[in-house]
Image (spheres, helix red, strand yellow):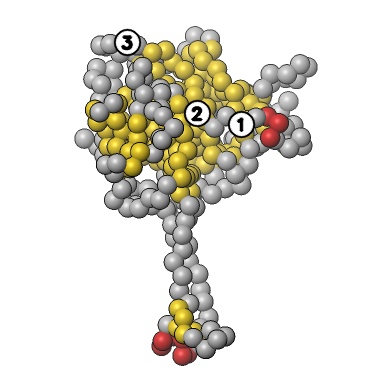
Amino acid sequence: LEHPRIRALKQSGGHWRSKSNTMFAFFGFVLSSCTVLTESLRHTGQHINHDGRAGTFVKALEFKHRLRICNAYPGTAAIDIYKGKGDRLNGDGPMPYKSCNDFVTPLKAGDKLEFKIGDANAGTFSISDLPNNDATLFLVIHRHDTLSTAVAFESHVFANLLNAQVAIVDTYKGTAKSEPRIMDAASAGKKSRSEELRFESVVAVNPGVYDVALVGSDGKTKAKNSLVARNRESFIILRTGVEAKMGPSYPQELVVYPKLDPSALHSSAVPQAMMLSVLAILSCVFWA
């Protein structure tokens, strides 16, 4: 089969930054509209309803911001997430290592997300701005380095696109080297195509069932998982683990979220060619 072609696209409305216990500014795009008004409305800012009452023609836009949080901090203790001091987001229970959840909660600039292990504060993420459109806001907490127990954050705003989007994030800390790859799910009598992925990037893929793997420098598969891609959905692929200098170490693993049922795909979507369109190459910036 012909090797799928990778082509670069310009992305609007999404960006990525990485930091340790401090905030980045979510970058959104501005929606503009043009309204034709009569001369009297330009002066008064009002219109007359059918019943003769004056009313405003300006209505505030409300956007839906879905907050997607993953816990990639290696350890046996689960994490609780609070918006502000008392609003616990994960009301169904603490989030263990390698878990992700979606939260639909009102957000505004200045909100703080506090991550706690028991009563101890693990880290705080501050929101300085929000995109002016419906969006999925992704945030992952992970270990900062192999020596300390300090945390770091990675974050991204997914653009509104028709294709399935996949963000590939490396939270592993250690000397082990491996590269992520995506391939057709194994099936009898079918030759599997394979593409290399890049950490700290976002790609668009066609709907379908795929395998994703971590391949080491020795050519051996270190970890494997499955991805069921569906249009208008945003996915996360995480490389997790730590080669700790102090305390327990955790091996390289692949986390994929969300996990969808293959039956949810339309039957005609599965045999499509695997197209990887590079949406963004994500640069990492750290603050003290």
Give the amino acid at mark 3.
Pro
Quadrant in the rendering for residue 195 = top right
From the image, tell me which residue sits under label 3.
248
Q: Earlier in the sequence, mark 1 or mark 3?
A: 3
Give the amino acid at mark 2.
Ile
Give the amino acid at mark 1.
Leu
The answer to whether one can see residue 73 in this image is: yes
SS class, disc 1: loop
From the image, tell me which residue sits under label 2.
237
**Residue drawn at (57%, 85%), measured in percent from left and top?**
50
Horizontal and vertical percent for residue 183? Answer: 62, 24
SS class, disc 2: strand
Horizontal and vertical percent for residue 100? Answer: 46, 30
Horizontal and vertical percent for residue 285? Answer: 31, 37
SS class, disc 3: loop
Measure how far apart labels 2 and 3 are at the Cα level. 23 Å
Quadrant in the rendering for residue 115 = top left
The image shows residue 205, relative to residue 241, as above or below, that is: below
**Residue drawn at (75%, 20%), measured in percent from left and top?**
190
Q: Earlier in the sequence, mark 2 or mark 3?
A: 2
Q: Nearer the viewer, residue 276 or 170?
A: 170
Label 2 crowd (10 A; few <14 / some 14-19 / many >=20): many
Q: Earlier in the sequence, mark 1 or mark 2?
A: 2
**Residue drawn at (28%, 26%), measured in percent from left and top?**
118
From the image, tell me which residue sits under label 1.
260
Q: Quadrant of the C terminus?
A: top left
